Structure formats: structure tokens, C-alpha cells
Image (tube, rainbow, N blue to C red):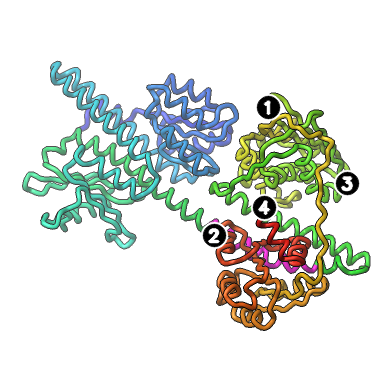
Amino acid sequence: MPSSSSRDEAAEKVNILVVDDLPEKHVVFTTILEELGQNIVSARSGQEALKFILEMEFAVILLDVNMPDIDGLETASLIRQYKKSAQTPIVFITAYVDELQARRGYALGAVDYIPSPVVPEVLRSKVRVFVELFRMNRQLQKQAAQREELARSEAARTAAEAASERADFLAEASQVLSRSLNLDDTIAAVLGLCVPALADRAILGIPDKEGGVRRLEMHPAPRADDPEVFTPELRGAADEVIREKQLKVWRKGDGRAAAICPLTAGDEIRGALALLGPESRFDATRLALIREFTGRASIAMENARLYSAVQEADRRKNEFLAMLAHELRNPLAPIRNAVHILASAESLPPKLGWARDVIGRQADHMARLIDDLLDVSRIVQGKVAVKPEVLQLAALIERSVEASSPRLGGREQVLDVVLPPEPVELDGDPDRLSQVLSNLVNNASKFSPPRSRIRLEATFEGGELQIAVQDEGAGIEPEFLPHMFDLFAQADQSLDRSQGGLGIGLTLVKHLVELHGGRVWATSEGLGKGSRVTVALPARIGTQSTGTAPVVTPRPAATRGLASRILVVDDLAASAETLMTLLEMEGFEVKVAHEGQAALALAREFRPHVVLLDIGLPGMNGFEVAHGLRAQPESRDALLIALTGYGEAESRSRSAQAGFDFHMVKPADVNLLLTMIADPNEARKAVATA
């Protein structure tokens, strides 16, 4: 019969700390976790959480990453500074985490990340594990204390040394297991920690869905002359452990034994760990240590498995985005070509002219959305690099305003630009910083009423340039301000989605500004009171006057005679036909091919000066066709332009290797394309000197 102390211990509730600034989140977590029958303590900020930690002991801390006063990562760092909470498991709750944030969290001692909104069953299962581990650890501590009180001084000293060794072992285990999120490395770390600290040999098995063994790892690895280690009897005992989800000691009968523990993730069995050694080695104390170690090993392996799954999902997502961009850009190309053809017409009825302008603006808008979506994907992967050069503030502002002028003009809005009296210069990528400022002005325009005023004001002080965009628009709720720059975050979640957009523009702004060593923030007095977004960048006093206008070099007109024969290769008939019509209107002789072999044959007969070649062709792809064109004398010296929906870095690199002179992403800038094909030699020189 269990003793009264054991019953009291089992009945005693443990503390679970939930830290989140949103009251509704506390209601959700309390509802989910009340089934565990434990004491749920709620903290509304990092400061309040630290106060509770000084007063109470917790089995686990559920910590929101995004909080207004002290965010979750800073709170976790402070928690780890207290000896009392240095080893308390911390589980981060977050709606979005990138790889850098995850690494920082695990470096601070986080044991898990749970995506928000949470799945109740998953949250309960994970918290239940920590509650059981906490109780087990507390029971071990109480038992050690009792032994210390009853034993003589030498026995007490021995027990203390053993407890210290166990604590050191578990601390080392936590550190080693958190070093990598690679599954192979984690398995190797688990086996390496077991031998010789816990057993003479360790075997880790991962079952497949059919009940077989999908993976079996052993340390140390058996030699060729060793007897069979993973015997049918041991396999049967491991199967029983997996079915019952309970630790089992399997005794061989010759003084040898195996402690077999299930590796779990919530209620799911992920595998089994068998520790082999002398039977006398597996006493109650050692088994308790094995249980605690196995719990930590289970968490580490599950984290590694989930991380691997996230990486695979991220890879598939990026492949999908690249393909999606290609498929969306293909139909945009003939649309833009058709708009240019209509723009070249001498006269159009007013309604047709209006329709042409609408189609052109919407095609440009679609192209920008596609580019933004791919930019976010590349930034999250750390694949976006900026190319800094010395920029004059006035020229940067003028370039950004020019890009936003059509949107402002369409809504009859006025943009007031205020620059500092002294000339200011900064180091930055002109394309990316123009993208940042244009996004902010476009955002202000979108959320402001027609005929309103928008203010772009730049100030310089103490080596820092601040550029603020202030509008008179819809304003921002205080609750949404901390999430302004989160990926896909949008304040407008109504069914009509009157403002549209993907919710990625400000995420792009934040990442691009940080790549330049700057910062960005937003303020608003509330709904209907407008908003102000400020970008801060390192800068310095320049040498040019702010009144100096940048020199604009006019684009040369297409010169006939330098290039007259053009071969268009595209499997999309609409794209090829509209491009052919456009070029013929400019006075070029044009031939069209829809696949690779036909293009090579036509090039031998036609001897083109310029080849506009799609990459995604049936049969031979564009890279193979480019190699073929460079190999035959009739097209070896032709200006070869990749005109394609694939715009990622890998495709651009392969284009250069295949012999392309230029890589242009659909829908291409028609004026730029005409300038290039008008004089191939000048186009090549421009690239060579860039």
C-alpha cells in the first residue's frame, strides 16, 4: 500500500507559468491545461513573470515571443540568470519563427517551439511531460534529502557526490542535445551520452508504420566477431515497451540486463532506447536517471524531426513559389506586350485608351506583387544580399517618389517632401532602398483617402538619418502595432479586404532596412488618426547640395540597321505572337519558334542578330538551346537574351554559364528590351562596364 507521503506527493499540484500580454490567450491556455489539474499562474508581461519566478517554482514556462515591454527572448535570458529558474524548461509560443530566432531561443535554453494558434492536444501532451519530469525530479531531490538525513556523514557525502554527478550529467546532456537540430547528430549525441555513463552499450531503434524497424543505431558498433546483440528476445522486449509506453528492465539470465525506455512525443511513440549492462547497474536511482535522460532525449529528437520537416516544407514552398512566379509571369508578358502595341497606335477611342491604361497598371501591379512575394522568400532564407554604394539623399528620395507618382496621381493625393538643409549621403543599395521608401509611400497612399496629403520628411542628427512617412489615413490600432512588420500580418481582415495586398510589404521593409544596418518602427494615435512609419539609417554629411538634381541620361532611340533579324523562341503562343507583332511594328524582321529543335534549325536558315529565348521550353530547355545556338556558326555571335519567368539566382547563374548575354524576367521592360536589341554591341559594352 502506498504511504501517505507518496499520496500527498502525488496529489500536490505543480505550478505552470503562462506569460502572454493578451488576456484572451490566458483564457485559451487555462481552458486547455485545466484538464491536467495543476496550478496555472498567469503573467501579463516579462516583468510580472520575473516577479512570480522569484516567489514560486515552476515545472514549465510557456512564453510568448512577442510582448510589448520585454519580448520573450529577453525574458528567457533574464529567467536563466536566476539560479532558481536556470534549468526550468521554457517553451516558446509564437506565430512565426525564422531560423535565426530559433537558434537564439535554443541557445537560451528553450526546449521547444509551439506554433500559435496552438493545438490543444499537442500543448497538453507537451506540458504533461514537463509536469511529470518536474515531479520525478522533485521526488529524486526529496529522496536524496531523506538519505542525507538518515545516512552517516560518509554515506551522505557519497550520496551528495552521486547527486552532483547526476546533475552534472543531466546538465551536460541538455547542453549536448541542444547543440544541433540535425536528426543524425542528435541520435549520435544520445548514444554517446549513454555510453559509458549509463550503460556498456546503447541501441536506439525507430519503428516504421508497419511495425518493423526503420532505423537501428548502436554504440559502440558491434565487431564482426561479436555475438548477435539485438537478439529476437531483446526485439520482443522492445516491442512490448513500445506497445505499453512504459520503461521495462529485460533480464537476460546471465547477470546481464537491458533497461528499455520509450522515446515519446506527446502520446506518440517515436522509438525505443535500450541500455545494456550488468543487472546490478540498473537500480532504482539509475532507472530514475535513465527516465529523466530519456525524456530529454525524446524532446531533442522530436525537435530535430520537426526541424527537418520544417526545412523540407520550406524547400518545397520555395520550389512552389518559383514555379508559381514563372506560371504567373508567363501570361503577364503578352499582356504587357499587347499594352505596348496599343500604346503605339496613332489614335484610339477614349474608352479603348482608358481600358489600355487600366490593363497596363494592373499588369504592373501583378508583377510587383510577384516580386515582393519572392523577395520575402529569399530574405527569410538569407539569400538576399545588398550591393551598397554612395548615395545622395536627394537623388534617393527623387527616385523613390518617381516610382510612387502614378499611385499618388491616380488618387489625387499630394506628397510633401521635406529634406534637411545640409547635403546628406549614405551607403546603400539604391534599388533596395528605393523599394523601401516606395513601399512606405505606396502603403500610405493605399490607406489614405483620395485628395489627402502625405508627408515624407527626412532629418539628420548624430550620424543617423531618419526618413518618416506620415499619412492622414485609417490609422493603426494599438494592439496591432507590435505586429506591423510580421510576415502576412494585416489589420484589415474583413471579408471584402477593401485595401487588398499580401501583407508582406512592411516585412520586406524591415528586412531590407536591417540589411543596411538600420531600424524601422511605426506609430499611430489610433484608428482614423493616420500613421507614421520611420526608417533610421546610418549616414553622414555629404558634399553635394540637396538642390542638385540627378543627371538623367536619355535612353537612346532604337537604331535600325545594327540589328534587323530577331528570332523569338517561346512555347507560349500568345507571348511569342504579341512580341513578334511589337517588334515588327518597330521595323524588325521576326521569326518565331515554339520549341528547341525548331529554333536551332530556323537559326541556321535565318541567321538572326538577336535571339529572345524562353528557358522553360518543352523537350530541350532554354539552357540546352543556348548551348546549341552558340555551337553553330550562323547564331554564334547573336545577342542572346533569356526572356523567362524564372528569376531566381540559380537560373541567372545557369543563364550566364549557358552563353546568354542577358537574363530578363517576364514581363520585361519593353523600352529597355528595344534599346538592347537595337544595338547589341552597345548592350554588351554596358554589361561589361557595369
Residue 683, by quadrant, is bottom right
In the rendered image, the residue lying farthest to the left is 254
Q: Which residues are magenta?
A: 317-338
Label 1: state its secondary structure.
loop
Alpha carbons under labels 2 and 3: distance apart: 40 Å
Contact? badges 3 and 1 (CB < 8 Å): no
According to the picture, the residue beneath numbered tag 3 turns out to be 412
Residue placed most toward the observer, 423 or 238: 423
Which residue sits at x=69%, y=74%? Answer: 568
Q: Please tell me how crowded label 3 is: few (under 14), some (14-19), or many (20+) other residues with Cα within 10 Å.
A: some
Q: Using the image, tell me which numbered label, if any, was put on residue 690.
A: 4
Count neighbours of disc 1 (C-alpha within 10 A) and say few if under 14, some if 14 to 19, many if 20 or more: few
Q: Earlier in the sequence, mark 3 or mark 1?
A: 3
Q: Main secondary structure of the magenta part?
A: helix
| Residue 253 among those drawn in magenta | no
Gap between marks 3 and 4 measured at Cα? 38 Å
CB contact under 8 Å: marks 2 and 3: no
Q: Earlier in the sequence, mark 3 or mark 4?
A: 3
